[in-house]
Amino acid sequence: MKILRNPLRYMRFLRQYREFSAQNAAKRPEFTVNWSDRWLQLKDDTGDQPFDGHYIYHTAWAARVLAQTRPTKHVDISSYLYFATIASAFVPFEFYDFRPAAVQLANLHCGKADLSNLHFSDQSVASLSCLHTIEHIGLGRYGDPINATGDTRALEELQRVLAPAGNLLIVVPVGRPRIQYNAHRIYHPQMVVDKLPELSLKAWSLLPDDASQGLLENPNFELAEQQRYGCGCFWFERPTA
């Protein structure tokens, strides 16, 4: 099927295979090139490097906050696993998910947690994140129970466990508020702020639909509402008094 969709690229692959095989036999005989070992990759010859803007930018944003705050330990609930594995290189990291990850790395502990009922004591976690996760809670996509207010419960739990002077990083889709069942919810930024009345919004960044400019720092909330599916990165803190 891939070949039928890309006949010109497949013909190019055949020409390059023959050319490379001949060169390799003459110059690099320590490597074998056999037709049975072929592994066609017909979509990667592009003019630029494609990437998923949401996942490139929001994890880069969160890593930069950790580099700035330098916590003695960071706890993450169900974010992108690549973020946990990379950030654990410079900060002790605990990663929890409804579906625990069997990753074995120094400085990284992986375990199971239910975001609607976190196992941490009240106001006990000084550095906490939940990135591109809350919008899914209660929609059943990942095997969690159906719950129309699951995201509200998740935010309540994150607020409950955040310590005084602690930092909470949250990332959700932003734009015109709606649910694309059962993928995710999309929020107006004020909806997120209103669900965390005990916390203060320290800063936020927006990745618009057109990600060509990257993250916009502290834009007006109305700009987020104009997006179809933007990415909102929120940095909250709990006041000490």
Image (cartoon, helix red, strand yellow):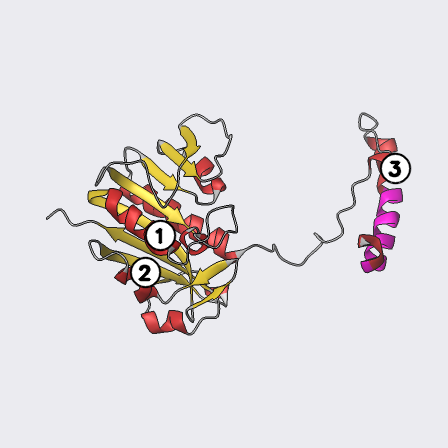
The location of residue 75, given as percent across then percent down, is 34, 38
**The disc label shown at residue 192, or none:** 2
Which residue corresponds to mark 1?
A: 170
Q: Amino acid at mark 3?
A: Trp
**Relative side of 76 to 45, left or right:** left
Magenta segment: 5-19
Picture residue at 47% right of the left edge, 27% below the top: 105
Crowd rating for badge 3 (residues with CA inside 10 Å; few <14, some 14–19, many 20+):
few
**Relative side of 30 to 213, left or right:** right
The location of residue 77, given as percent across then percent down, is 39, 42
Lower sequence index among marks 1 and 3: 3
- Asked if the residue at tag 2 contacts the one at tag 1, i.e. Cβ–Cβ closer than 8 Å, the answer is yes
Whole-Å distance between the Cαs marked 2 and 3? 55 Å
Q: Number of labelled discs?
A: 3
Compared with residue 11, is residue 212 higher up or lower down, i.e. above or below?
below
Q: Is residue 224 visible?
A: yes
Compared with residue 209, is residue 92 higher up or lower down, i.e. above or below?
above
Check the picture and name the quadrant holding the N terminus: bottom right
Q: Which of the two residues, 59 or 102, is positioned nearer the viewer here?
A: 102
Q: Amino acid at mark 1?
A: Ile
